[in-house]
Image (cartoon, rainbow, N blue to C red):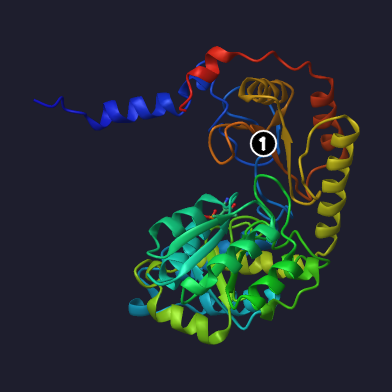
Amino acid sequence: MTKINSLEDHATRRFRLAGKAYLESGDPFFAPIDSLRKEAAANGRRFVSFANYDYLGLSSHPAVKSAASGALETFGVGALASRLVGGQRSLHHILEDDLAKFIGTQSALTLVSGYLANVTTISHLLGSRDALFIDELSHNSIVSGAKSAVAETIIFRHNDFDHLDFLLRERRESYRNVMIVAEGLYSMDGDIADLPRLVEIKESHNAWLMIDEAHSIGVLGAEGRGLCEYCGVDPQRIDLMVGTLSKTLASCGGFIAGKAAVIEWMRYTLPGFVYSVGLSPVISAAAAAALQLMQTETWRLERLRKNAELFVDLARESGLDTGPAIGRGVVPILFADSLDTLDASRHLMENGYYVPPIIQIGVPKDQPRLRFFISASHTEEEIRGVIDLLARREPVSTAPALGAAVAP
Ligand code: PMP
């Protein structure tokens, strides 16, 4: 008889293979953090977080909070149904119109998360005679979308558009529609795609282009309008943008944006929109208020830029490895191995900074790092302080025994 494999046994084994041993000397994850500088309930100490993507420092802004509480009073909490069959709220339209205007597209549609936006859009758009070309470092939501699509997925080397062009030359003719997916600001490396080149390639191969602007809205470009503004490309040349309300927009939820005809079709057919609830009025109001603030309190973007540039300059001067980061909202610091990364994270935690290690998940296993989200609300002293701690830390030696506990 086959031995029964309980779900509990299965989970325990899989977690061990995924590197659970790293947690045994203290769990750096899921710390109780209520805001950037609050008392940490766990140890009663104060620490500064570089682990939250509140790029412009809007999540606790009085105008965002009062928009949210006003909507709560007027409309209650829930959206109550899918908008197609249950009706929608004026706040949904306001937010979507404002988003489309800000990004420079004709239309936008919100969904309950950015993750869902990627998964459902990618799998919905492409059929069995189509292909998807994605960057090897794509966010997991893009990979999940690709896995759920019936179309073939072809992976190009990170930001290597000669490789993409080569693959398209070789294979474009075999498919009906092809879509290329890239990101605005890569969430683990803080680098960007060469968008003018990408647009040229997409146009020459008659492909669609989707850009995930999750980390670039409010971060890139003179006014924070994203990768197009940063690279001087007309947003109308991008077929589809995907974004989130959870980062600069200080809320929760996702969106897609593009030509009116495309978004109109999605409004009636996109499974993740049609078969899921609309955004809560509370978070719609908060995100709409944050979007307004981005355009009125423009000093925030300037402050973010200065903070991020200071961070990256100090790190590089100190000999820390920031990889290809361009010095905007996301900057990684790479370490020799997972053990050294864990040690660096603990060292920061002991000295008042919260930066959990990125090991095993979300990055190649041989490229562990601390990933810093820089915010307009960080002070120069905090930035200098965290870099100084890392610069003066002695690296720990590597431990093959721990590495051996990790899945092949
Ligand atoms: N795309 C990218 C590039 C992301 O980094 C993330 C979240 N970290 C998402 C999509 C998902 O966004 P959300 O948090 O709204 O689900």
Q: Quadrant of residue 76?
A: bottom left
| In-front residue for pair 202/260 | 202
On the rendering, which quadrant does ligand 1 occupy? bottom right
| 407 up-or-down from 140: above or below | above
**Neighbour tally class for label 1: few under 14, some 14-19, many 20 plus, Cα within 10 Å:** some
- What SS does tag 1 mark? loop
| 46 up-or-down from 283: above or below | above
* Residue at x-position 53% and y-position 21%: 22
| In-front residue for pair 356/90 | 356
Question: How far across and down, in percent of the image, does residue 370 sit?
Answer: 68, 34
Quadrant for the N terminus, please.
Answer: top left
* Residue at x-position 59% and y-position 78%: 206
| In-front residue for pair 116/307 | 116
Q: Amino acid at mark 1?
A: Lys
Ligand 1 has an atom within 8 Å of the beta carbon of the residue at disc 1: no
Q: In the rendered picture of this protein, how many numbered marks are placed on residues?
A: 1
Q: Name the outermost residue toward the bottom.
A: 261
* Residue at x-position 34% and y-position 25%: 12
| 309 up-or-down from 175: above or below | above
* Residue at x-position 61% and y-position 75%: 205
Question: How far across and down, in percent of the image, does residue 245 sit?
Answer: 59, 61
- Residue 280 lies left or right of residue 363; in this view the side is left
Question: How far across and down, in percent of the image, does residue 29 sit?
Answer: 55, 30
Residue that numbered label 1 is attached to: 38
Q: Quadrant of residue 201?
A: bottom right
